[in-house]
Amino acid sequence: MAAVAGWLRRAWAHDLAWSFRRSPVTILAAFLTLVCVGGALFAPWVAPHSPFDSATLNLSDGFTPPAWTAKGSGKYLLGTDDQGRDVLSTIMYGARISLGVGLAAVLFSAVLGVSLGLLSGYLGGRLDAFIMRVADIQLSFPAILIALLIDGMTRIALPRDMHDQLAVYVLVLAIGVSGWVQYARTVRGSTLVEKNKEYVQAARVIGRHPLAILLHHVLPNVMGPVLVIGTIHIATAIITEATLSFLGVGVPPTQPSLGTLIRIGNDYLFSGEWWITVFPGLALIVLVLSVNLLGDWLRDALNPKLR
Amino acid sequence: MKLRYLLAAALIAGCATTQAATLRWGAQNDILTLDPHSQNHATTHGILQHTYEGLVRYTKDFQVEPSLATSWQVISPTQYRFNLRKGVKFHDGSPFTADDVVFSYGRIIQPQGTNQIYVSGVKEVKKIDDHTVDLILGGPNPVLLRLLVDFRIMNRAWSVKNKSENVQNYVAKEESFASRNANGTGPYVIKLWEPDKRIVFAANPAWWDKLQGNATEVIYTPIKADATRIAALLSGDVDIVTDLPTQDVQRLRNEPKLKVLDGHEVRTIFIGMDQFSPELKYSSVKGKNPFKDIRVRKALNVAVDREAIKRVTMRGLSIPAAIMIAPGVHGHTPDIDKVSPADAEGARKLLAEAGYPNGFDFGLDCPNNRYVNDEEICQALVGMWARIGLKAKLNAQPMATFIQKIQKFDHDAYMLGWGVATFDGLYTLQSLMRTKTTGADGSFNLGRISDARLDALVDAMKTETDVKKRDAMLREALVMTRDNYYYVPLHHQLRPWAMKKNVSTVHKADDRPESRFARID
């Protein structure tokens, strides 16, 4: 208990914590992110309704406007969609998918990119040239296009039933593969610098295996920028997933994400049922904006030149 | 002098511009094929009727009038003699003769097509001379002329030259020259078809009749997304939209630049069930087929809240249905088409009685770009059935792939709509209820229902000329279908069209807009 309290006190006094406390925008962004993540994580317990359990839906409740409008009802705070699903609950469940896919894709991207970057920087030679050329080629395509390509190929390759079950994993793979390049190039640059420092040379002299050198010595020293890229990449990954779902090639409609909800609501936007698309859209904006602001703060806080 | 020439030129130019008008027509789904004998699909027929014609056609109020045949005599109840129109040319210049009629008959009855119903009851087509044919029937047929409207004539020489004597096998994804090119006698020539993009028609200057409208060019654009379709109409990219999303109808009525043409459609939307397979293909129930039990079928029927679907999903634009034909079709009477309110409790009891107290799951196939709000209706049904314990796994896809799948009997339950091209109940009973044989019988009986008493009624109806007796048979057959719950009828569609204020046309209850009536001012 005392150890934890001591740790907390030290953490509070740390540079990062001080820089965090100084910026009200960052505090707000962190709070909003926490709300979004909390709502998404605890959706099955916190959400007022279960919108994806068909047995609980009541079609007659469809198209109810938000609670504060004339025809609204207190039962559905943000209104319902065309099948009678509560919009607030669908946003919470949708945020789950959006966040889940975003985080998993970033993790995949980071692991892939950092590994390739480390190998490329440390080993050099033909492997380095090959990996970097592949990265260059991939950079000339827009990320969405690459994600679409991978998704399309798996759609053709897998039978339809299997595709729906694996859709989320395919999506993570697609977005992950479209984003590894940034990590690889940054890590490669840092690795090239670290490679020639004394402590690495010392480790080589005493005969440590190259892999051990990479993992124990080089990796901790190149992780800083990766953290920053990762945080900002979460926002991009969430937007990419929303775009793919909006186009209809993302998650299957049985597990809608925020992008799917926006697409469903789009049809009703001009006939007066604006809440079905506006609220998921706002939720997406708030989520991505707060994550982006957090990433910005982290980048500035970790930049030695700004300290 | 110069002024007079100038005035004359201006007048001529003025006339020319009022004569030539392009009608841009938007709808939901694209045609399946250009082969008129391949698929019995209303959108395909609606487009192809501009190019391919039959011996007779409908007037604006669905009376039969001469088309490629100028007159006919009933030599005996089983022998009709048709005098063919002289001087008609196909779009490639070949003359229309009796050989083409004989050839088209031989082609339309081939088993891989689904249009045999339009020559149902015809045993043989005999050429008497170049401009006379005899249709020999198997028995008296009271609706023959109505059926012949969709028996479209192709040119024999053109088909043989392009190796298209055989009807395209659409289910096997076959392509042929005739499925990609058209050569008919009709008012419009199909200039090009880019599947899922557009079809361009140009008026046929050598047509034997006159256009009642002034559309010299028609561009048909399938736009699946509801919001995009309406946006195209509002922005002026299309002149007329015949597939209105229900949520936008009120808004379009209030729009000053547009007008909405109301009209009902003789199309009934329903759910069909596999009642033939010993075991359902996508279900959790192994070893038996729950849909063979009338109590299960009744439970599915009774659990559907048609009024809620009408109010919420269709925004009032549907007529809840208890029988499989719509008002306006001969044989429909309001007393047999009374819908009872939904009863989830009763449905659950029925399922328990049938041995499924915890329900079961099954696959539900639906199109998503064909009928008004088709996918949304299916989603609503999933919810209603989930409440009684039946978990339906929805598989919604575009009509082109959906129709291939269900015609291969690869389904547990499916949604379909049936419009009645002849405006007579026999058309529905024969295609949907009668046991499937080759030909027109049971051509869309995709659940493979087989009821011997129903078959006997349908067969008797085909040749019964006494109207009272025939009407009684129609009624009995419709009631039998209803009370055996062979299908789950949902509703009859109401189908308003929206168009710019300067466009006028005739609303057709068979959902086949005819551009020859369209006038753009």
Image (spheres, helix red, strand yellow):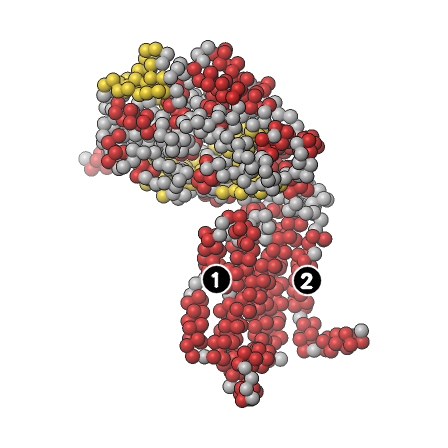
Residue at (36, 27) in percent of width and height:
B109
Left or right, B50 with reference to B355? left
Q: Check disc 1 and report the residue beneath it.
A: A143
**Which amino acid type is marked by label 1?**
Ala
Q: CA distance from mark 2 to mark 1?
A: 28 Å
Residue A153: quadrant of the picture: bottom left
Asked whether the viewer can see residue B246, the reply is no
Circles 2 and 1 on the same subunit:
yes
The one of B480 and A5 positioned closer to us in this rendering: B480
Residue at screen point 25% across, 17% down:
B128
Q: Is residue A109 visible?
A: yes
Chain ID of residue with mark 1: A
- Compared to residue B361, the image places residue A26 above or below, namely below
Report the residue that reaches farthest toward the right. A2
Label 2 belongs to which residue? A34
Spot occupied by residue B172 in the image (x, y as percentages of width and height): 39, 40
Image quarter where the C terminus of chain B lies is top left
Callout 1: SS: helix
Q: Quadrant of residue A198?
A: bottom right
Q: Quadrant location of residue A133?
A: bottom left
Residue type, numbered disc 2: Leu
Give residue A287's position: percent from left, percent from top.
Answer: 62, 59
